[in-house]
Image (cartoon, rainbow, N blue to C red):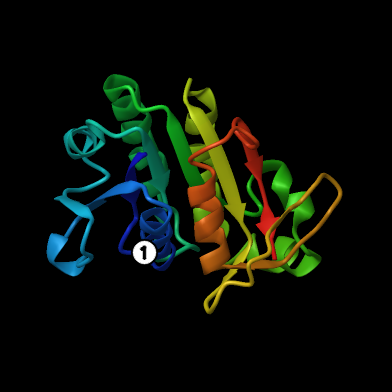
Amino acid sequence: MKVLVLGANGRTGRLVVEHALELGHTVSVLVRNAARFQRAGVRVIEGNALNGEDVLLAIQGQEAVVECIGGVAPWKYQTLERVAMRHIVSAMDRAGARRLVVVSAMGVADSARQAPWWYRWLLMPTFLRGIIADKNAMEAIVRESALDWVIARAPVLIDGPAIASVHVLEQGETGRAVTRADLALWLVQQLQGRAYVGQAVVMVN
């Protein structure tokens, strides 16, 4: 499958690129500085996800998009993800790309009930307040689209080797963390199959 990865210079995005290549996908990335992204076998497009023309150019000819964009100051008010997602959805509609896999966060909408108490009452109102609000708005744009979308509401992300075991939380279950490597592989796996299409889920190790 021809896949565009947004946020490919981030820690999760780079792992998504690696897993997508390992699984035989044809990978392109849209990055602001092409010199910062060096990976053989990847088509690198220089541009900004906040520029609709750049996003449309990158999505032309693609079949799917994995969006791993994230802000650098999660406590501050921001509109990064909602603005980027408007461009992504519009460009996918125009280009005929169908599958959209998005990284959101545990705590958005009803997933707050799946978070441990310290995450809900200590992190969400303080350290995560800006990014949670932006991701809420971003998810609304995804849900209103006609795309085949999957939203991964990531919990606490742990660097290090994959555990190779991911559990998608059911209603009434709570969870704490997932490794970035396991999350990245799960995201790539959602490019095919329909098990979670049209769903926003939390996954943990």
Examine the image and state in which quarter residue 10 appears: bottom left
Q: Secondary structure at mark 1?
A: helix
Q: Quadrant of residue 178?
A: bottom right
Depth check, front residue: 20 or 180? 20
Residue shown at 42% from the left, 65% from the top: 73
Residue 16 figure quarter:
bottom left
Closer-to-camera residue (44/86): 44
Image quadrant where one finds the N terminus? top left
Q: Along the horizontal axis of the image, is 149 left or right of 33?
A: right
The answer to whether residue 128 of the structure is visible from this angle is yes
Q: Residue at x 50, y 55 (%)?
A: 131
Q: Position of residue 8 (x, y in %)?
A: 32, 58
Camera sees residue 79: no
x and y, in percent, of residue 134 in the image: 48, 47
Left or right, 7 with reference to 129:
left
| For residue 34, side relative to residue 119 (left or right) | left
Q: Residue at x 63, y 40 (%)?
A: 200
The C terminus - image quarter: bottom right
x 47%, y 25%: residue: 147
Where 102 falls versus 31 (above or below)?
above
Q: Amino acid at mark 1?
A: Arg
Specify whether 195 is left or right of 22: right
Residue 183: % across, % down: 56, 60
Residue linked to disc 1: 14
